[in-house]
Image (cartoon, rainbow, N blue to C red):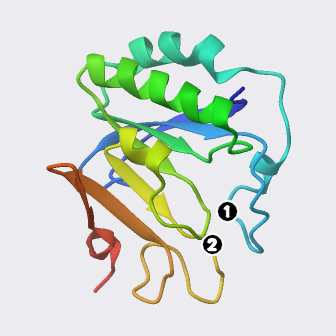
Amino acid sequence: MLKFYDYNVTNSWEVPNEVCLNFHLAECLNRCPGCFSPELQNSTDTNLVDVFEDLLLAYSNRITCVCFLGEGKNTDYEHIEFETLCKKIHSYGFKTCLYCGRDCRIEEWMRCFDYIKVGSYKQELGDLSKKTTNQRLYKKENNVYIDITFLFWEE
């Protein structure tokens, strides 16, 4: 079960050129030193599915994308929940994004997302705004994921 911690709306912060409704998921297992959101390592009693559609509809006139910050405990059951949520989001005409936070390649279960960020946060390498970052944001175009990390880089 995907546990829900908090949400917010951001303009081009998580995904360039998108206004995102961001769901901050609890129970992150990564434990990155210097993490921006260490509170997401904790558990909560709130099931994302219970609040998801009401929040999506409440912000539907302001957003273009729904972003999931974290992937919970990364279980097969949660992967199925993500697929179901992505189908619902796409049916409303919005894009989807996953910030997984692990050092991995794009996995098969992630392919339901239009954008995927991979890579743990490494303080010495910086976040997505730094050219030295190990993190990468990919955008799906014609069913192929293209690295668009450079769109975050400061000149």
Counting from the top left corner in percent of width and height, residue 141 is at: 17, 52
Marks 2 and 1 close (CB-CB < 8 Å)? yes
| Rendered residue at 27%/56% (across/down) | 139
The part of the image, by quadrant, that contains residue 131 is bottom left
Tell me the residue that label 1 is attached to: 36
Residue extending farthest left: 142
Residue 8 position in % (x across, y down): 53, 36
Position of the N terminus, as image quadrant, is top right
| Mark identifier at residue 121 | 2
Q: Which is more toward the observer, 67 or 100?
A: 100
Quarter of the rendering occupied by the C terminus: bottom left
Q: Which secondary structure, mark 1?
A: loop
Residue found 64% across the figure and 23% down from its top: 48
Q: Residues within 10 Å of mark 1 (few under 14, many from 20)?
A: few
Q: Position of residue 53 (x, y in %)?
A: 49, 12
| Amino acid carrying mark 2 in the image | Tyr
Q: Amino acid at mark 1?
A: Phe
> Residue at image x 29%, y 25%?
90
* Alpha carbon distance from label 2 to label 1: 9 Å
Q: Earlier in the sequence, mark 2 or mark 1?
A: 1
Whether residue 60 sits left or right of residue 124 in the image: it is: left
